[in-house]
Image: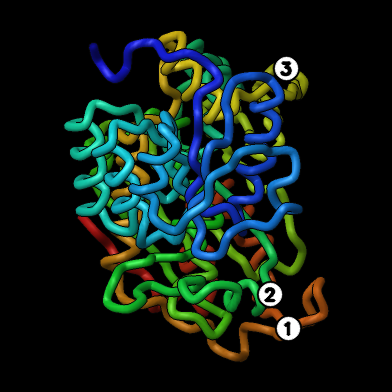
Amino acid sequence: MSRLDALRVPLPVVLAGARGHGRWHLANLRRLEAAGRVRLAGVCELAPLDAGELEGFAGVVQGADLDGLLAATGARIAIVCTPIASHAELALVAARRGVHLLLEKPPAPSYAEFRRLADGVAAAGVACQIGFQSLGSHAVPAIRELVADGAIGELLGVGGAGAWVRDEAYFRRVPWAGRRRLDGRDVVDGALTNPLAHAVATALALAGAPRAEDVERIETELLHAHAIEADDTSAVRIRTAGGPRVTVAATLCAERPAEPYVMVHGSRGRVTFWYKQDRVLLQRAGHGPEERVHGRTDLLENLVAHLTEGAPLLVPPAETGAFMRVVEAVRCAPDPAEVPEEFRRSVRGEGGGPRWTVPGIDALVDRSAETLSLYGELGAPWAARARAVVR
């Protein structure tokens, strides 16, 4: 029988990486366990979780060896929410045991590692869902339908914007934070590739260019204001194969935090999608603005439905190939340039510690999404020497 033959719920799950963002997965597992869809069978962590962290769960096996834990628990699904450099290796450990996967983004720190992951998963015959939660939003197919129906005319391009605030403590929370490489291994923990990766993946999906072969050319502008190795203020422009341009501007040095969004430009209007809120605004010639909030399908829930009912998988690896081409462009670009001191300012963060901001960056991020331009093209003097092109 195929490993994708229908399984029975509740499906036993092992969570690898239960702290940091893993706490979100624990909360989601509580919800789905109460609904009878899954059962948390094991947690893979270097330091075991205490009773408070496992409140609401029973019979959870803990250990630091994922392979042994999968064997001991009989898990059918593994959630991998570990440091970026370990994603592909741990996913392949699970795949070789015939265990299906929910793999956090970015799936790998390089395109070669991504191909090794995708090929290994395919050879093992297991399902793999990549954790771009925004692609579970019902707004994504709704916007695609609006574009296909000509609601905004000819599709001209897609712009993404993310203006977030992160203090220096954010980059000190774990050894790999803000790093391009660590101990000889790629990490590529930049604004575009990790915290605001959803803006990139969502923009590519709405442009109809989610796969690796959809990308023809990539331009990057990578900079940092904080004392880190990776980028905290960056922009990327992707020329798609026979399709629209995709531009995403991202910063962790905003003056004020804002909801990230993707803007779909047409010849007779535009659609703005605030992807964390599932909120869509349609603006078009001859009509008043139309706003709607859509529902969302949880990606673990979709993976369970795929395994038990044959539902289509929402975010298989192939649908993130274009995003991984962007990761590779960032990885291969020259190291990010430092924003000169005269163009950055140290302020007190929400937690009381210091953080860096780039005055005017909030408006530049919005203008990039509106005009599909990079920072340098918008007149930012600090971006002049940061541009790189990957063909």
Tell me where residue 22 appears, x and y as whole percent. Answer: 59, 51
Residue at left offset 47%, top offset 46%: 104
Does residue 362 lie above or below 215 as drawn? below
Query: Between tags 3 and 1, which lies in front?
Result: 1
In this figure, which residue is indicated by the disc labeled 2? 167
Question: Residue 55 appears in which quarter of the rendering?
Answer: top right
Residue at left offset 51%, top offset 71%: 177
Does residue 290 lie above or below 96 as drawn? above
Q: How many neighbours does mark 2 have within 10 angstroms: few (below 14), some (14-19), or many (20 or more)?
A: many
Q: Could you tell me the amino acid type at mark 3?
A: His
In depth, the one of 227 and 27 nearer the eye is 27
Quadrant position of the N terminus in the picture: top left
**Sequence-earlier tag: 3 or 2:** 2
Residue at left offset 37%, top offset 66%: 187
Q: Let me know if residue 159 appears in the view.
A: no
Tell me where residue 344 appears, x and y as whole percent. Answer: 64, 83
In this figure, which residue is indicated by the disc labeled 3? 287
Q: Could you tell me the amino acid type at mark 1?
A: Pro
Secondary structure, mark 1, is strand
Q: Are marks 1 and 2 in contact (CB under 8 Å)?
A: yes
Tell me where residue 194 appears, x and y as whole percent. Answer: 49, 57
Farthest residue in the bottom direction?
341
Residue at left offset 41%, top offset 22%: 313
In this figure, which residue is indicated by the disc labeled 1? 354
**Sequence-earlier tag: 3 or 1:** 3
